[in-house]
Amino acid sequence: MTLHIVDHPLAQHLLTRLRDVETPPPVFRTLAKRLTIALVIEAARELPSIEVEVETPLQKAPGRLISPDLVAVPILRAGLGMLEAVTELFPEVTVGYVGLERDDTTLRPTSYYEKMPALEGRHVLLLDPMLATGGSAAGATARIAERNPAGIVFVCVVAAPEGVRRMEAEHPEVPVFTAALDRGLNDKGYILPGLGDFGDRLFGTGPDSGLPPLTRRPG
Ligand code: PRP
Ligand code: URA
């Protein structure tokens, strides 16, 4: 398995702002999308492209187009924070979904939803921001691989060495693109230093969530 750490200064700038505990959900969502664009631009090196010729206003020009067989699969729920980046970069992309939720105690993911287009012979971008133990990414990759795609590329925001080792052991053919390889996991399976619970920060469902007090009367 090849691990690609996207160390472009802009990617690192966006990651640093995402990590910051002071970043609130509306900003977190924007940063997540922008960082995913930077990651997917790099991951697109793994996608096949074909040589074409186009007419400019002046003459013919040779060019390349990325193959239109692309399928994006976000792992619900946090992977949704990466999806819009892909649909904007590749408006023709087909989208499949895998719903996985990690048990807080066993850290094993259970599947609660799956909706997949035909994948045979197609190229899949699998999206999940956090590669922690690797159980979710490896499980989703296995479900996708059963459908015989031509290739799978996994894109995440932060990876832990444990998750990278698991992907290497179970899916050595799948390249992994990430903005950071962090130190490790704590005893609850959270990445250190990480950025906390990505899904909670994206959707505002953390322990401090709830309605903020009204500071002035409406109307
Ligand atoms: C988080 C994250 C990954 C998974 C990573 O999802 O988005 O899917 O944990 O952990 P792992 O590598 O140890 O499997 P979570 O299960 O918390 O669900 P959510 O996306 O609904 O918040
Ligand atoms: N899931 C997250 O959202 N964050 C982690 O650090 C680990 C798993």
Image (spheres, rainbow, N blue to C red):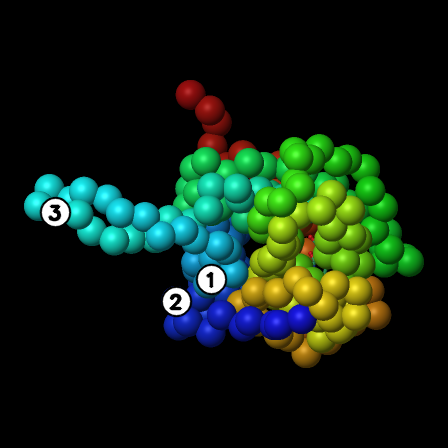
* Of the image marks 1 and 3, the number of the one nearer the N terminus: 1
Numbered mark located on residue 59 in the image: 3
Residue most toward the right? Answer: 106
The label nearer to you, 1 versus 3, is 3
Q: Is residue 92 above or below residue 26?
A: above
Cβ–Cβ below 8 Å for labels 1 and 3? Answer: no
> Which picture quadrant has residue 118?
top right
Instruction: Check the image and name the residue furthest to the bottom.
Output: 183
**Disc 1 versus disc 3: distance between alpha carbons?**
28 Å
Instruction: Tell me which amino acid carries mark 2.
Output: Leu
Q: Of tags 3 and 2, which is closer to the observer?
A: 3
Label 2 element class: helix
Can residue 157 be seen in this snapshot?
yes
In the image, 152: left or right of 39?
A: right
Q: Residue 25, position in %: x, y?
A: 54, 48
Which residue is identified by label 1? 45
The C terminus is located in which quarter?
Answer: top left
Nearest the camera: 144 or 129? 144
Q: Which residue is mark 2?
A: 10
The residue carrying pointer 1 sits among few (fewer than 14), some (14 to 19) or many (20 or more) residues within 10 Å by Cα, namely few
State the SS at label 3. loop
Task: Determine whether 186 is above or below 63 in the image.
Answer: below
Classify mark 2: residues with Cα within 10 Å, few (<14), some (14-19) or many (20+). Answer: few
Give the x, y percent position of residue 184: 73, 75
Residue 98 occupies quadrant: top right
Looking at the image, tell me whether mark 1 or mark 2 is earlier in sequence order.
2
Asked whether mark 2 lies closer than 8 Å to ligand 2, one says: no
How far separated are the C-alphas under marks 1 and 2? Answer: 18 Å
Residue type, mark 3 in image = Gln
Q: Are marks 1 and 2 in contact (CB under 8 Å)?
A: no
Check disc 1 and give the amino acid type: Arg
